[in-house]
Image (tube, rainbow, N blue to C red):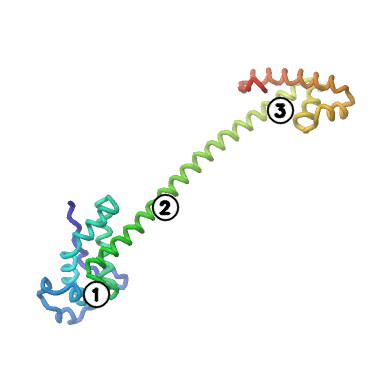
Amino acid sequence: MTEPPPPASDPSSKTGGGSVSRGNEADNVSPLLSETSDAGIVVAISRYNQDALAEAYRRHAGAVFGLARRLLAEAALAEEIVQEVFLRLWNDPDKFDPGRGSLRSYLLAQCHGRSVDLLRSESSRRRREENDLRRTAESGYDLEREVWDLTVADQVRDAIGKLPEIEREAIRLAYLGGHTYREVAAILDEPEGTVKSRIRSGLKHLRSDLVDSGVTLGEDQ
């Protein structure tokens, strides 16, 4: 298994408030940190003892890394989580309550929560990217279709303009004006049969002209 990264050489420099003055408080901590309990280690960390943080890291970083690695399936991300968990311990040691469990349990809980947050963030990011790609693809398709429709519309207008006036007016009223054959006949003051015949003739001419222009039409058009 990949070894977890070492703790930051100076975690206090990452607290956002610059280096923390330690005074002589670290001198009060026993140099035998390896024999100090986890609770004592955290007390020493609260006094800005970096050796205490290193000892906590030595004891528990492997377990934290192992959990992060299983959850995230990527060593690089797991290493980031380990650094973040121990940086949080350095910045907020008082959040650890020895009465509620062991330090390892606390660190693993922090690791689990942060890993889940990262997974959700990555999942949301992937969904956003997929949605953006889908919208881009759809918009590209819509744009292509719109351009084609506009092209066909221009060709249809040109083709209609070439029809004889009596055919053009009957088609304009029926297809562009939305009138029925009977209404077109009434408007033109022509027999309904005559209007239908003119429309059929005009559509044949229109179809032929559009096909010659390269527009593909279905059999029913």
Task: Provide residue 156's location: percent of width, then percent of height.
Answer: 69, 26
User: Looking at the image, which residue is at 27% across and 64% down?
Assistant: 85
Among the two numbered marks 1 and 2 on one chain, the one whose residue lies closer to the N terminus: 1
Instruction: Select label 3 or label 2 by which is in front.
Output: 2
Q: Total number of numbered labels?
A: 3
182 sits left or right of 28 in the view: right
- The answer to whether any part of residue 12 appears in the image is no
Instruction: Tell me the kind of residue under disc 3.
Output: Arg
- Residue 110 against residue 45 in the figure, above or below: above
Among the two numbered marks 3 and 2 on one chain, the one whose residue lies closer to the N terminus: 2
- Categorize mark 2 by other alpha carbons within 10 Å: few (<14), some (14-19), many (20+): few
Task: Provide residue 91's location: percent of width, then percent of height.
Answer: 28, 71
The Cα–Cα distance between marks 1 and 2, rounded to whole angstroms, is 35 Å
Checking the image for residue 124, the label placed there is 2
75 sits left or right of 144 in the view: left
Rendered image quadrant of residue 148: top right
Q: Are marks 3 and 1 in contact (CB under 8 Å)?
A: no
80 sits left or right of 138 in the view: left
Is 194 or 38 nearer to us in this picture?
Answer: 38
User: Looking at the image, which residue is at 27% across and 50% down?
Assistant: 73
Checking the image for residue 157, the label placed there is 3
Which quadrant holds the C terminus?
top right
In the picture of the structure, the residue carrying the numbered disc 1 is 98
